[in-house]
Amino acid sequence: MRAAVFGLALVLVVAFFTRWDLWVGSSIRQTTNDAYLQSDTTPIAAQVSGVVRSVPVADFQRVKTGDLLAEIVDADYRAKVAQAEAALNAAIAAIQALDAQKITQRTLIEQAKANVKGLEADAWRTRHEEDRQTELAERGLAGTQQALQQAQAAAQRAAAALEAGRAQIDQQTAILQGLDAQAQQAQATREQRDAELALARISLGYTRITAPADGMVGQRQVRPGQYVGPGSQIITLVPLPRVWVVANYKETQMTRIRIGQPASVRVDAYPDADLHGHVEAYSPASGSQFALLPPENATGNFTKIVQRIPVKIVLDEPNPLEDLLRPGMSVVVTIDTSNAGSRHLASASEGGS
């Protein structure tokens, strides 16, 4: 009898120290009060520097996409746009002037080519006259030495003029090639001026700070007359009513929790309302792994601490508290894990496919 009691006590002790938390993970309904409402809170900051002209929204005001939140004095930026436009117009005019010069240059090349044709005819005529006078002089039939010398001089002058005409064509062609290079440079300058104008217009647009989404703004952080620089926070936008729940479950509670399982949510501020949702996702690591200084358990003494895993829960429609919920509110979440097995298999089959 004593041996049986001792054996039972030993089993109980072993079970307590090794499987004491089995009942936690196997529970069908997993509840935590370490849960809060979350939303895509967006700090709106200035992208250019300047003096604030106006802040036409009030604290905690609802806004629509595109509504003006703040405006920076834009006189300098409008002047930069005008300056960039003038520079672009000058670049366009330079390209047009080069195009006109290229047309004129092509005309000069054609003129030089026509002149060469006339010079070729003169060279042909004088060369043949020189040959005729040379032949007459060799045969002693007619002509004089003076006529031969004049024919030779005329042939040489015609040949020289022809070479000069051909050189003129090369010169005019080289000038046209230079104009082509200048045109490419002018085109690159125009593209640069286009980019500068685009940047100037973008900077001008940044002087009007608008709402990127529907929602509600927080407290204004600037006032008219205040100087702001790039990165200066203007106001915070919360895209209400899009909120969800982040519940930080203990790792020992995650045994049966799966994506898609139903959840009930009770907001501390509205305890009489019972909201419904479902598990959409959970964190790839425990919260401690995302801390500024993650724990390093390989050094010093070790004390085991139960970690928490953030679980995202999306609220189902209809939501009777849609206009009342605010990020940061405390909630109590209970997840129904009764279908853990089927959900797990479904997730696995979807991942395998």
Image (cartoon, rainbow, N blue to C red):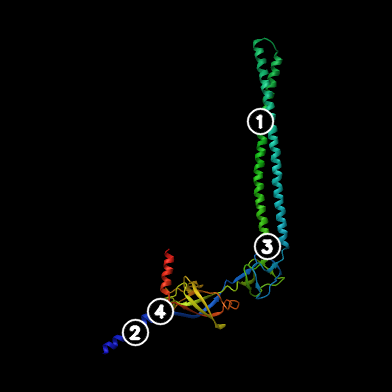
Query: Which residue matches tag 3?
Result: 205
Residue mark closest to the camera, 1 vs 2: 2
Q: Quadrant of the C terminus?
A: bottom left
- The amino acid type of the residue labelled 3 equals Gly
Query: Which residue matches tag 2?
Result: 13
- The amino acid type of the residue labelled 1 equals Arg
Residue reaching furthest to the front: 318
Q: Earlier in the sequence, mark 1 or mark 2?
A: 2
Residue at point 67%, 47% (across, down): 186
Query: Which residue matches tag 1?
Result: 166
Residue reaching furthest to the bottom: 1
Whether pointer 1 and pointer 2 mark residues with C-beta atoms closer than 8 Å, the reply is no
Mark 4, Cα crowd under 10 Å, few <14 / some 14-19 / many 20+, is some
Real-space CA distance between mark 3 and mark 2, rounded to the nearest whole angstrom: 72 Å
Query: Which residue matches tag 4?
Result: 26
- The amino acid type of the residue labelled 2 equals Val
Whether pointer 1 and pointer 3 mark residues with C-beta atoms closer than 8 Å, the reply is no
The part of the image, by quadrant, that contains residue 151 is top right
